[in-house]
Image (cartoon, rainbow, N blue to C red):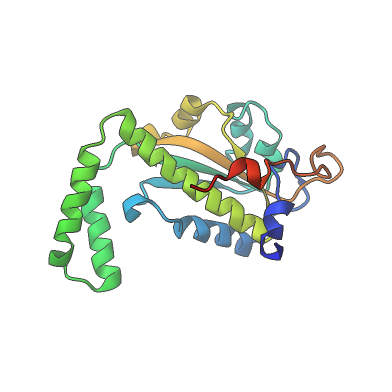
Amino acid sequence: MKDLEHLNWRYAVKRYDTNKTLTTEEVDCILESIRLTPTSLGIQAFKVLVLGPESPHREALRPLLNNQPQSVEASHIFIFAAQKSISEKDIEEHIQRIATERQQPLEELSKFQLGIKGFIGGLAGNDLTEWVNKQTYIALGVAMSEAARMKIDTTPMEGFKAKELDSYFKLPEQNLASTVILAAGKRDHNNDFLANLKKVRKSAEELFEEK
């Protein structure tokens, strides 16, 4: 499957080449892929913090990522942060955005708006958190796939001190909580033990079942 070669090429990089940084165009493509990611109701209830090689926060980030080398070696770090709650204002802004982009009267969207309010209103506590967090992982997957298509290496990272990271970036004050991190750059062929190893996955027969 030639069209999927980029997915066979990619792996979760452990060591990055610090002499190779992503171009502005490459970073913009990753960010645009995140922006275009499908999300439930299209509400995009998350934000992404972008830390480039010159970010003053990179060294401070290292202990928060449990001293994983990607924290300082990768060209860029993308921190996905989900909203902790969704307000009526958020919903109204979403509806207004749809009306503006599609040149559609607000009245035509009233039922959709009520549907969103009803759905979100029915999500309490952990249910809302889980639902919003899932949206960030959809965006993470799209970003990794697009990065691989451009021959950009990535590493999804969950092993970090979320509460301390949130506090450092003052995320709670912005109604946000970190969910997952994506490191991106170019692999270090000489120091990454995974660089030349074969990808291991279940066979199609094991993974898929037709009913």
Quadrant containing the N terminus is bottom right
The residue at the far right in this view is 190
At which x and y percent is residue 154? 66, 47
Residue at left offset 50%, top offset 30%: 165
Task: Judge left or right: residue 172 versus residue 107.
Answer: right
Q: Quadrant of residue 7?
A: bottom right
Residue 65 visible in the snapshot:
yes
Residue at left offset 72%, top offset 42%: 13
Between residue 62 and residue 11, name the one nearer to us: 11
Residue at left offset 68%, top offset 31%: 68
At which x and y percent is residue 132? 37, 40
Instruction: Classify 149 as above or below 79.
Output: below
Between residue 194 and residue 210, name the one nearer to us: 210
Between residue 106 and residue 176, name the one nearer to us: 106
Between residue 90 and residue 102, name the one nearer to us: 102
Residue 22 visible in the snapshot:
no
Task: Judge left or right: residue 192 versus residue 7.
Answer: right
The residue at the far left in this view is 107
Instruction: Classify 150 as above or below 66.
Output: below
At which x and y percent is residue 173? 34, 34
The residue at the far front in this view is 211
Total numbered badges shown on the rendered structure: 0
Task: Judge left or right: residue 134 versus residue 21.
Answer: left
Residue at left offset 42%, top offset 45%: 135
At which x and y percent is residue 30? 56, 57
Instruction: Classify 146 as above or below 86.
Output: below
